[in-house]
Amino acid sequence: MIMIIIFPLLFSLFLLPLLFLLIARRKAPERLPPGSLGIPFIGQSFSLLWAMRANTAEKWMADRARKYGPVSKLSLFGKPTVFIYGQAANRFVFSTDSSKMSNQQTDSVRMILGDRCLLELVGEDHQRIRSALASFLKPDSLKNYVGKMEEEVRMHLQMHWHGQTNVTVMPLMKKLTFNIICSLLFGVERGARRDMFVLYFQEMIDGMWSIPVDLPFTRFNRSLKASVKVQKMLKDLIYEKRAQLASGAPSHQDLITCLLSIRGEGDQQLVSDDEIIHNVMLIMVAGHDTSSVLITFMVRVLANDPDIYAAVLREQEEIKKSVSTGDFLTWEDLGKMKYTWRVAMETLRAFPPLFGGFRKTLEDIEYQGYLIPKGWQIFWVTGMTHMDDSIFPEASKFDPARFENPASVPPYCYIPFGGGARICPGYEFAKIETLVTIHYLVTRFTWKLCCNDNCFRRDPMPVPTRGLPIQIFPKKLL
Ligand code: HEM
Ligand SMILES: *[C@@H]1O[C@H](CO)[C@@H](O)[C@H](O)[C@H]1NC(C)=O
Ligand SMILES: *[C@@H]1O[C@H](CO)[C@@H](O)[C@H](O)[C@H]1NC(C)=O
């Protein structure tokens, strides 16, 4: 008798909620990924930044993966974050619809580069600016600029390499790639104005990955102030180029002129002045900090591996023979630098300039049975996939032959340039400047490393020890 009362009571008090819980659990993945969010606000930011500076970021990630598996939560730069890696993760990040997942920059990057740059835009706006940039950065347009790029490389070597016995590669390559951008993209010639540009720009970039505290004397404050000056200079530049356009054909078609002349319905300028300024600043950063890393690490690879060096030299000497002295390289010549480009690709696999990036979820998203709540960050990384032995056999070995057959690399596994709708639009540009620079370096110099430790730290771009000092020996020019 008593059972008849107790059983329903038990059922409603205890079993019913349990049943409800079980059903609810099956319906929506309420399960957050494993891992701890750490100390509020700070989270694991310092531990990651410290690992990057100490060149142990790869170990930091591997330890994390061992402990929590391929999906884990943590908190970075003040936001709850999910860390994912591997082929499936890359596909997820690069192919999820932009209505569900948007790009995410740190506050300091947004405040310095401006809110109309590509990194901040989504959907149609993103598409419109990308195709405007692509009209300039596509191979068909770039092939007219090989000579201009080469002129910058020759001038750079004349000024900073010939007549020297020792040089430091990293800062010099930054200088070179920045000058190439100034010349080709902004049409700013050598001289006082370009020097000023470089100065302000360096100040601006110094504070870009700092903590956004706008007090006098902070790095961030200096950086913001420099950003205002750079924007002012760009405004003047736009003004001049618009006047040039109005008075007939400009002498040199640079990126700014090109963006100004894209017209929509009713002859409206399709890219606004603010959009031009913010995207030009983005390209200044995205375009010179990355390719300078690639060229620097290639110089190190060539010094460390005599076989690879000999093969690159053979290819470049062959091309040089067909170019008569005083003449410039052609687009066809670049097409013949197949082995050299494979060395570059392998360099990007082993030392990807970009460590990874962030996305933000715009709604609750399920990934591998876990819930990633709306508004969280997703942290994707290049290195973990590039160093996976099951994708790249003997991944720690440097071997350009991996790229002889591009089809042998599975999709979403080689990601130094990202992927999907936001894949790097500067790929061809970076390829041309790298090939032209390496052509001149190997045909004009031999070099020895002054520092053989083969280490680097991330700041957040990879920097070899002491910026890679080398001893150089000019070749006798025939
Ligand atoms: C070796 C050189 C380079 C590497 C490794 C590289 C890498 C990358 C990566 C990984 C992304 C995607 C980031 C993401 O999805 O979150 C990206 C985006 C971008 N890159 Fe590059 N990049 C290089 C050179 C360049 C150059 C030379 C330019 C310009 C001339 C450039 C302009 C851009 C721009 C504008 C974006 C943003 C695209 C968007 O959000 O739609 N990059 N780059
Ligand atoms: C930077 O600090 C100065 C004081 O030195 C202050 O007046 C200014 O508002 C701060 N921020 C910017 C962006 O200039
Ligand atoms: C150049 O580098 C070599 C090798 O590291 C070193 O012995 C030499 O002292 C350096 N020369 C100068 C002028 O710095």
Image (spheres, grey):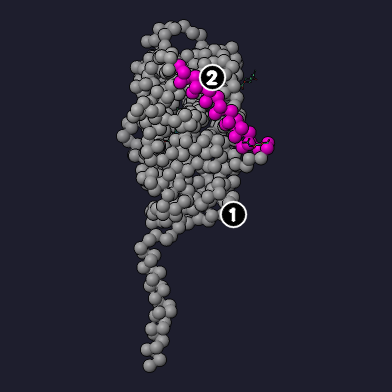
Q: Position of residue 449 (x, y in %)?
A: 56, 24
Q: Tell me the tag on residue 447.
A: 2
The answer to whether residue 223 is magenta is yes
Kindly identify the residue that appears in the image at 50 percent across and 46 percent down: 61
Residue pictured at 40% horizontal, 37% vertical: 125
Q: Quadrant of residue 193?
A: top right
Q: Residue at x 41, y 73 (%)?
A: 18
Question: In x, y percent, where is residue 94?
Answer: 38, 42
Q: Element under label 2?
A: strand
Say which element carries label 1. loop
> Taking the image as drawn, is residue 399 in sight?
no
Q: Earlier in the sequence, mark 1 or mark 2?
A: 1
Q: Bounds of the magenta span?
A: 216-244
Residue 340 lies in the magenta-colored region: no
Q: Where does the image place residue 277, in percent across and percent down from the top left?
A: 49, 29
Left or right: 255 as drawn, with respect to 196: left
Residue with the mark numbered 1: 39
Tell me, yes or no, if residue 88 can be seen here.
yes
Q: Amino acid at mark 1?
A: Ile
In the foreground, 98 or 277: 277
- Residue 379 location, x and y as percent? 47, 46
Q: Residue furthest left?
A: 407
**Which residue of the protein is positioned furthest toward the bottom in this rendering?**
1
Q: Quadrant of the N terminus?
A: bottom left
